[in-house]
Amino acid sequence: MINRFLLPAGYLPFIAPLSIFKYYEELRRKTGAVGFEYFYMVDQNPDIINSSPIGGKIFGIHGPWTQAGSYYKFIFHPKVAFNLEKSAEKTLRFAKTVGAKYVVFHSIDIKNNFIQKLIALAKTLKLKIYLEPDMGDNTFALAKKFKLPVVFDPATVEWNGENLFAEWEKAAPFVAHVHLNEYQPKLKKDQGILKSKRYGELIKKIKASGYQGFFTFEVSPLQSRWDFVVAGLFLLASYSGLADLFPIIRKWYAGISQKNLAQSINFAKLALEGVAFKNAGEKLC
Ligand SMILES: [Zn+2]
């Protein structure tokens, strides 16, 4: 099997200092993933990333998803977060500087009045733009109108109450990239560890369709209510500087990310290699 696995980087753990990158690289080596899809928080310095352990290994950039949820509004510099055009343009220029080949934009961050300009800039910079659906939006209309490929994210599909297989059939002709993660019904959020049989079946179906793109594992450390407590403590420690005084705090949190990602990657490997696996997850559909 050709290795087409990418790991998320940049937002796991979300406000960690850039020194956390060594954990991403450690995980990449352990899991055998080929590179990263980097979650760009507007105004980060690309030079720091280029000189970090993940420098030169970034295949794609995930746009900032500025309009979805108060969490992002809290984290982003408000001036940039509320100027979509400027933020999208900065994302493309950042992508170019770190050597990425594609940029994922959630369609909520792309507006008709500047999309044409953005496509022109991407062409000049030799970057591809992929559109990722949000909750109940117009991604496919935009994709058709501007001839942009899309990202298939099964967790978003289930979050929208849609069927994985029917949506894959619909999206397949337009798909350039796949985000692998599960919908977590108990938490009503995405980025769950891959474990349920239907996700395994879906991965097999994607393979059988002849899909040749990459898979990014969008799996976060947040898998239970307890994980939110841990994340809260981590945030507090990072803001107060305690995480710098006690690096063990950072290592602990990074360890959770690593464990969840490794489990999901193993699951996907088994599905792609056609080996039988157990249904460890709950039924949703
Ligand atoms: Zn996604």
Image (cartoon, helix red, strand yellow):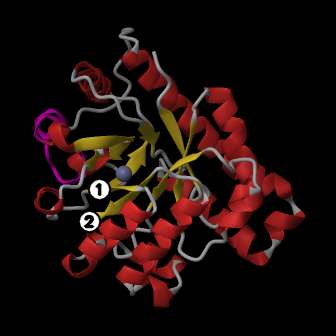
* Residue 43 x %, y %: 58, 77
The residue depicted at 61 percent of the width and 28 percent of the height is 31
Query: In front: 182, or 94?
Result: 94
Q: Secondary structure at mark 1?
A: strand
The residue depicted at 75 percent of the width and 54 percent of the height is 52
Measured along the vertical axis of the image, is residue 186 above or below residue 261? Answer: below
* Residue 36 x %, y %: 56, 45
| Amino acid beneath label 1 | Glu
Measured along the vertical axis of the image, is residue 84 above or below residue 131? Answer: below
Relative to 142, 31 lies left or right: right
* Residue 215 in view: yes
**Residue matched to label 2:** 107
Query: In front: 226, or 114?
Result: 114
The quarter of the picture where residue 118 lies is bottom left
162 falls in the magenta region: yes
Answer few, some or many: residues within 10 Å of disc 1's Cα (few below 14, many 20 plus, some between 14 and 19).
many
Measured along the vertical axis of the image, is residue 32 above or below residue 176? Answer: above
The quarter of the picture where residue 139 lies is bottom left
Q: Main secondary structure of the magenta part?
A: helix
Q: Secondary structure at mark 2?
A: helix
Name the residue at the right extreme. Answer: 245
Q: In the rendered structure, which segment of residues is drawn in magenta?
A: 158-170
* Residue 23 x %, y %: 72, 45
Per the rendering, the mark at residue 132 is 1
In the picture, which quadrant includes the N terminus?
top left
| Amino acid beneath label 2 | Ser
Q: CA distance from mark 1 to mark 2?
A: 6 Å
